[in-house]
Image (cartoon, rainbow, N blue to C red):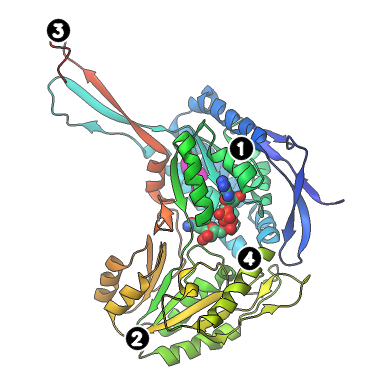
C-alpha cells in the first residue's frame, strides 16, 4: 500500500530489509486503518541477528568494557529516552490503542529503570567462599550468559522490553529483541534514538515478524543462551519446547486472573478507584488485571452500587484525547475474544450488571464497553480464563478463609489486591494468597526496584529489581591451590 511508513529490522548496527522482501501491515486500533509496514523477518534474518549478537558478545569493544562503563552507557540511554517520551508514546498508542496519557506516563518513568540498573552495574559481584579445605582459595565470579532473546507482547511494548534489556546489558550480555507483530514500531523508533548512545554494533538487535516464523527460530537458535518471554500461555508452551533445542535458560512472564479483595473495613473510596485501575485501566489489557473481584457480603450491595456508578461514567474514546479514560482494544481478534467471553458469561448464568456491547461499528475502532458480571461460582470459565479486556467478574464472600480459598481457586498466580485497614489480616492474606505480587490498599504500582513475576500458569522467573540481574548472569567457581606440596593419590577426590 502506498504512503505507509516502512520499517526494516535493526541487525548488527544497520537497518536491514527482510530476506524475503516482504512486509506486513500494522493497524491503528482507534481507526482500524493500517498505518505502517513492518519487515516480515524469517529464520535467515534471525540467524543473522543472533550471529551478530554472538560476535558482539565476544568483541572487545563490548566484552572489554568495565561494568562501570556499561553503567555509563545505560545512563545515556535513560537520558535519550527522557528526551523522546512523547514521540515514542505516540507510536505506542498508534499501534496498541492504549491511552496516549497512559503511555506517556509509563514511558516518562522508564528512564528510572535505566538509571537503577546503571547504578547496579558495578555492584554485582561474586563471593569469596570460606572453603573447608586447607590451602585452597575459592571464589565465584558473576559472568554474563551470552546472547539473550527477548520476546514481548503488544500491551506495553517498550516497558516490557526495557525490563529485559537493562539488566541483560549491565550484566554484559548482548540481545536480540522480537517485539509483537502488532506493535513493532516503538522499539524500532527507540533504536533510532539510542543509536546516539554509542553501543558497538550487534549488542542490541531488533528482528520483527510473527511468532512461528520469527519468534520460533529465535528461541530455538543454538547460539541463544537465555530467552526472556512475556506473553500468553500457549506461546510460552511452544517456547519451552523450543528451549529443548538450545537448553537455554528461560523466564516466562505470562497472564493472570488476579483477585482484588475488598473487606468491609476498607477505605471504599480508594477501593473503587483501585478496582477500576485494576480492570479498566489499559482497557483490561494488562497481565496484572484485577479481573476477579471479591467483595465482603456486608458491604456488597453498597460497594457494587458505588463501583457501577463510576464505571458508567468512564469516558471511552479516542486514545489521543487527554479526556478519554479507556481506549479501544488492540486488535480485531481481541474484540472477538471479548465478545465470545461475554456470551459465555451469560450462558454460564452470570448476571450482567453493566456494559456487554461493542461501542460503534465496524470501521470506527475496536471499542468495547466497560463490562461487569456478577457470579455465583468461581468455577465458571469466565472466572477462570484470562480475557484480556474490560470485563470484571464479581463474587461475594463471608470470611477470610473462604476468600483465600476462592482467590486461590485459579490456574494463575500473578498478582492480587487486598483492601483492608486491618494490618494483621493484610499480613495473613499476603502469606496465603498464591501470587508473585500482592498490593495492599493499592493496585498496579510499579518500580524498578520491585520484582515482577508469577507462579502456576503465570510463569516463572522474575523481572525488575536486583533479582533480574542474577537471572542474566551465571556464577563461575574458581579454585586456586596455594600449596606447593606434591600431589598424592590422583584417584582420590580432593
Ligand atoms: P502472545 O503470546 O500471542 O505473543 C507474545 C509474543 O510471543 C509475540 O511477540 C509473538 O510474536 C511471540 N510468539 C508467539 N508464538 C511464538 C513462538 N512459537 N515462539 C516464539 N515467539 C512466539 O501474547 P500477546 O497476545 O501478544 O500478549 C498478551 C499476553 O501477554 C497475555 O496473556 C498477557 O497476560 C501476557 N502479558 C504478561 C505480562 C507479564 O509481565 N506477566 C505482561 C504483559 C502481557
Reading the image, the residue beneath label 4 is 334
Q: Residue 229: x percent and y percent?
A: 50, 48
Is 1 situated left or right of 106 in this image? right
Q: Residue at x 29, y 82 (%)?
A: 399
Could you tell me how far apart the alpha carbons at marks 3 and 2 are, in whole angstroms?
Answer: 75 Å
Q: Are marks 4 and 3 in contact (CB under 8 Å)?
A: no
Quick one: SS at disc 1?
strand
| Earlier residue among tags 3 and 2 | 2
> Do labels 1 and 2 touch, CB within 8 Å?
no
User: Where is ligand 1, by quadrant?
Assistant: bottom right
**Looking at this view, is 121 or 226 the one in front?**
226
Tell me where residue 406 sits by quadrant: bottom left
Instruction: Give the residue pinned by disc 2.
Output: 264
Per the image, the residue denoted by label 3 is 486
> In the picture, which quadrant includes the C terminus?
top left
- The answer as to whether callout 4 falls within 8 Å of ligand 1 is yes
Q: Which residue occupies the extreme right position in the image?
A: 2
- The image shows residue 170 at horizontal and vertical percentages of 46, 38
Amino acid at each position: 500500500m502506498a504512503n505507509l511508513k516502512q520499517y526494516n529490522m535493526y541487525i548488527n548496527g544497520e537497518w536491514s530489509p527482510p530476506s524475503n522482501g516482504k512486509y506486513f501491515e500494522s493497524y491503528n486500533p482507534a481507526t482500524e486503518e493500517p498505518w505502517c509496514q513492518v519487515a516480515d523477518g524469517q529464520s535467515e534474518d534471525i540467524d543473522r541477528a543472533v550471529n551478530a549478537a554472538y560476535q558482539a558478545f565476544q568483541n572487545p569493544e563490548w566484552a572489554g568494557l568495565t561494568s562501570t562503563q556499561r553503567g555509563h552507557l545505560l545512563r545515556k540511554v535513560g537520558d535519550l529516552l527522557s528526551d523522546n517520551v512523547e514521540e515514542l508514546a505516540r507510536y505506542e498508542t498508534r499501534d496498541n490503542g492504549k491511552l496516549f496519557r497512559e503511555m506517556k506516563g509509563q514511558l516518562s518513568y522508564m528512564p528510572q529503570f535505566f538509571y537503577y540498573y546503571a547504578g547496579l552495574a558495578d555492584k554485582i559481584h561474586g563471593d569469596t567462599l570460606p572453603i573447608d579445605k586447607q590451602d585452597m582459595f575459592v571464589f565465584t565470579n558473576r559472568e554474563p550468559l551470552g546472547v539473550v532473546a527477548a520476546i514481548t507482547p503488544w500491551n506495553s511494548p517498550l516497558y516490557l522490553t526495557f525490563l529485559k534489556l537493562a539488566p541483560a546489558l549491565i550484566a554484559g550480555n548482548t540481545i536480540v529483541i522480537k517485539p509483537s507483530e502488532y506493535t513493532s514500531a516503538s522499539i524500532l523508533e527507540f533504536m533510532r534514538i539510542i543509536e546516539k548512545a554509542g553501543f558497538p554494533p550487534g549488542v542490541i538487535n531488533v528482528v520483527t515478524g510473527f511468532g512461528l516464523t520469527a519468534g520460533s527460530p529465535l528461541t530455538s537458535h543454538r547460539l541463544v543462551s537465555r530467552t526472556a518471554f512475556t506473553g500468553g500461555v500457549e506461546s510460552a508452551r511452544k517456547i519451552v519446547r523450543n528451549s529443548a533445542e538450545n537448553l537455554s535458560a528461560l523466564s516466562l512472564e505470562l497472564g493472570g486472573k488476579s483477585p482484588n479483595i475488598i473487606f468491609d473495613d476498607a477505605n471504599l473510596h480508594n477501593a473503587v478507584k483501585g478496582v477500576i485501575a485494576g480492570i479498566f485501566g489499559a482497557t483490561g489489557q494488562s497481565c496484572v488485571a484485577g479481573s476477579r473481584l471479591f467483595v465482603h457480603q456486608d458491604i456488597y450491595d453498597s460497594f457494587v452500587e458505588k463501583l457501577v456508578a463510576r464505571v458508567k461514567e468512564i469516558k471511552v474514546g479516542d486514545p489521543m484525547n487527554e479526556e478519554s479514560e479507556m481506549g479501544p482494544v488492540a486488535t480485531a481478534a481481541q474484540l472477538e475474544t471479548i465478545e465470545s467471553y461475554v456470551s459465555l458469561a451469560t450462558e454460564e448464568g452470570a448476571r450482567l450488571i453493566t456494559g456487554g456491547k461493542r461501542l460503534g461499528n465496524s470501521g470506527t475502532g475496536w471499542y468495547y464497553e466497560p463490562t461487569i458480571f456478577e457470579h455465583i461460582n468461581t468455577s465458571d470459565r469466565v472466572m477462570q480464563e484470562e480475557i484480556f479486556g474490560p470485563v470484571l467478574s464479581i463474587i461475594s464472600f463471608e470470611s477470610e478463609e473462604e476468600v483465600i480459598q476462592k482467590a486461590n481457586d485459579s490456574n494463575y498466580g500473578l498478582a492480587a489486591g487486598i483492601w483492608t485497614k486491618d494490618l494483621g489480616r493484610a499480613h495473613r492474606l499476603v502469606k496465603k494468597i498464591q501470587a508473585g505480587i500482592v498490593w495492599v490498599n493499592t493496585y498496579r504500582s510499579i518500580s524498578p526496584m520491585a520484582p515482577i513475576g508469577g507462579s502456576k500458569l503465570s510463569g516463572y522467573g522474575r523481572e525488575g529489581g536486583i533479582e533480574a540481574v542474577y537471572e542474566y548472569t551465571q556464577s563461575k567457581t574458581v579454585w586456586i591451590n596455594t600449596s606447593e606440596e606434591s600431589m598424592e593419590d590422583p584417584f582420590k577426590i580432593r
